[in-house]
Amino acid sequence: MKQLIYKSLGLYLNTLTRIAPEKGGKLGFKIFCTPKKKKLKREHLDFLHSANLGDFDFNGQNIKIYEWGTGPKKVLFVHGWQSHSFRWKKYIEAFPKDEYTLIAFDAPAHGLSDGKQFTVPHNAYLMALLARYYHGFNAVVSHSIGSFSFFYAMAKYDLPPIRKLVAMASPGKAREFFTFYIEALKLKSSTMARIKNEFQQYVKEELDNINLSVMIENLSVPGLIIHDRDDTQTGYQNALELRDNWKGSTLHTTQGLGHNLRSGEVVQLVADFVKENPLEFADF
């Protein structure tokens, strides 16, 4: 059923773009930036409501902020596409609450936050505002497009001090975001050219320039990169390129965990890195 929907949508976009190129490009852009908002389960809500809840006004959109703990060390957790702050439950539980203040937020159009659309620049600007609001962070822990968004924020904005950064399963280039839609919707190159043009007008730069090798040229924040060899959503090559271009970073490779990297060992690895405990970065 899902494949039939994708095929029909792709056929419609290809046809519309041929007949009315500008309309087709704009609709494709809108579809690409509209995540499917998942209904939160009772276990999700119970955990999120265990936090000190806050509301952050982001250009008229209400962004839901969660805080656990009251310690002086602040850690920000950044989720990825079509996710929400519950993904960080095991990580939140790994830190002493008297020593840390653990902060998460639902990105625009995700979780309990307002909005219908999500883009990397939009998310990056939100994180820049949050960094200023909290006067920097001892560490930022991020996953997938959340990692890419934070790299974008660091490249585009003058952020307060960020002492450590964890990047899990990060994409490497903006054009990777199109791969799924091209394959699933069977989009023609002419259709994609119009959609890409809409994106470039939105970000006001060439999409090929939005890649990690450019964004981290001057990055010196100590970092931990975690990526799985079997990640089918963001290829392992991204991690190798990120490591080679990010001075002060360490790559930890996993096998068999896929894109989500759900593992108690990964949780402990991240917690130890943030807490500055001695580590031996052996693959597991």
Image (cartoon, helix red, strand yellow):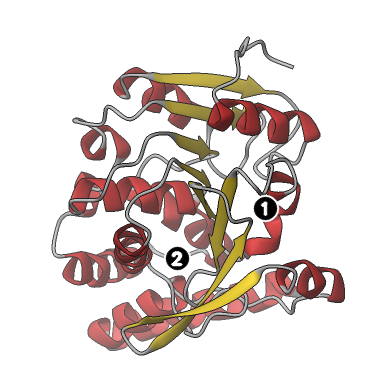
Is 280 placed above or below 33 here? above
- What label does residue 187 carry, if any? 2
Whether residue 77 is visible: yes
Is 61 placed above or below 128 here? below
Please name the amino acid that badge 2 sits on.
Leu
Where does the C terminus fall, quadrant-wise?
top right
- What label does residue 88 carry, if any? 1
Q: Which residue is drawn at 35% across and 41% down?
A: 162
Q: Residue at x 50, y 28 (%)?
A: 225
Q: Residue 18, how many percent across, how many down?
A: 31, 80
Horizontally, is 54 left or right of 240 in the view?
A: right
Q: Which residue is drawn at 76% across and 28% down?
A: 265
Q: Residue 168, how many percent across, how many down?
A: 55, 38
Is 229 placed above or below 152 here? above
Q: Which residue is drawn at 47% across and 53% down?
A: 146
Quadrant of residue 249 within the rendered picture: top left
Helix, strand or loop at mark 1: helix
Quadrant of residue 253 within the rendered picture: top right
In the picture as drawn, the residue positioned furthest to the right comes out as: 42
Q: Residue 151, how many percent across, how many down?
A: 33, 45
Q: Distance between the residues labelled 2 and 1?
A: 35 Å
Please name the amino acid that badge 1 sits on.
Trp
In the picture as drawn, the residue positioned furthest to the left comes out as: 204
The numbered mark, 2 or 1, whose residue comes first in the sequence reads 1
User: Residue 180 versus residue 224: which sits nearer the camera?
Assistant: 224
Helix, strand or loop at mark 2: loop
Whether residue 226 is visible: no
User: Residue 203 versus residue 101: which sits nearer the camera?
Assistant: 101
User: Residue 25 versus residue 125: which sits nearer the camera?
Assistant: 125
Q: Residue 152, how many percent across, how many down?
A: 29, 50
